[in-house]
Image: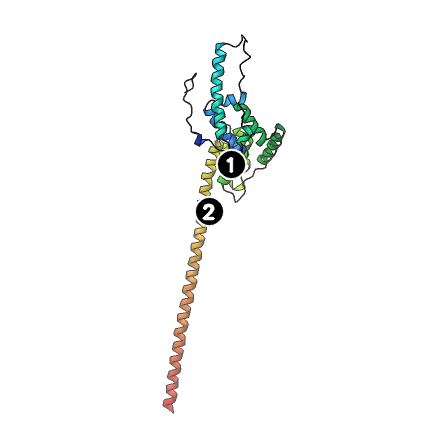
Amino acid sequence: MDAKSGDVLFSYSTNQVPIFNGEHYDYWSSQLMTIFISQDLWDLIEDGFQDPPETGNSSWTDENQKEYKEKLKKNATALRITHHGVSKSIYPGIFGVKKAKDAWEVLQKEFQGSNKAISVKLQNLWRDFDNLTMKETESVRDFNSRVAKIVNQIKGYGDTIQEQKLVEKILRSLPQKFDHVVAAIEESKDLSVLSMYELMGSLEAHEGRMSRFSSQPLEQAFQSKLNVSHNKFSKEEQGKRGGNYQKKGQYRKGRGNFKEGQDRG
């Protein structure tokens, strides 16, 4: 429990901390940030804390000392999580760093880049977001994965995106076969409160209905083709049998004539 508020903090083990090995820093940092927030440590990572003044400074009260000790304890917890969250090849980069905020910034600068580099990456990501379009042959689930990937990267670099803007972009990016669904959603839903999760759920449900309807004519066409083939086969078979009977009759007639000739002779 938190000593001040009495809130129960999220219980975790070090085995649950994701390990960063130098790849996909945005994904890893987002996961670690969630852990820090759940442990009431994110403020410490963002803002850090001040060390006590030199001995003899009368402005440093007992309350300041108590608060400092509490932050030291939180700092140790945050630093421990960070240490467990990096691989052996990454750890030397933060070895000896005493404050969790400093360790976080070291990793951020090395693997996410400087502010200028981040700005450039964000520009590229926003361009990718603006150019998003669902392909005709693409499923809603696959399109959702592409959208989520870009959005998570944008958020990972510290930028924000409003849910309404995201929903409106998805609706504009759908192919023509979804036109009537888009019109229905825009008329019946309040886009200012509609979430991306709800929208994608509706689109997947509609996609499932379209798939069932489109498969029915194909099954009927296949059955019709089978019927035609069966009828053609039946007629051919009947023709073959009829021809054999005719030839057989002609053969018998010939035999009869041949016998009549012999009798006349």
- Name the disc covering residue 214, or none: 2
In this picture, residue 102 sits left or right of residue 261: right
Question: In front: 145, or 38?
Answer: 38
SS at mark 1 in the image: helix
Residue located at (61% from left, 28% from top): 115
Q: Amino acid at mark 1?
A: Val
Give SS at disc 2.
Answer: helix
Crowd band around label 1 with a 10 angstrom C-alpha radius: few (<14), some (14–19), many (20+): some
Q: Is residue 14 left or right of residue 118?
A: left
Name the foreground residue: 165 vs 4: 4
Residue 151 seen in the figure: no
Image point (42%, 69%), residue name: 239
Along the line of sight, which residue is nearer the eye, 173 or 241?
A: 173
- Residue farthest along the top direction in this orientation: 58
Q: Tag on residue 207?
A: none
In the rendered image, residue 259, in percent from the top left (x then y), is placed at 37, 86
| Tag 2: amino acid | Ser
Using the image as rendered, state which of residue 114 and residue 178 is in the foreground: 114
- How far across and down, in percent of the image, does residue 119 sit? 61, 30
Name which residue lies at 38% across and 77% down: 249
Q: Quadrant of residue 238?
A: bottom left
Is 108 situated left or right of 13 in this image?
right
Q: Give above or below for 64 relative to 189.
A: above
Give the crowd class for mark 2: few <14, some 14-19, many >=20 residues within 10 Å: few
Earlier in the chain: of badge 2 and badge 1, it is 1
Residue placed under numbered mark 1 in the picture: 182
Furthest residue to the bottom?
265
Q: Position of residue 81 (x, y in %)?
A: 48, 27
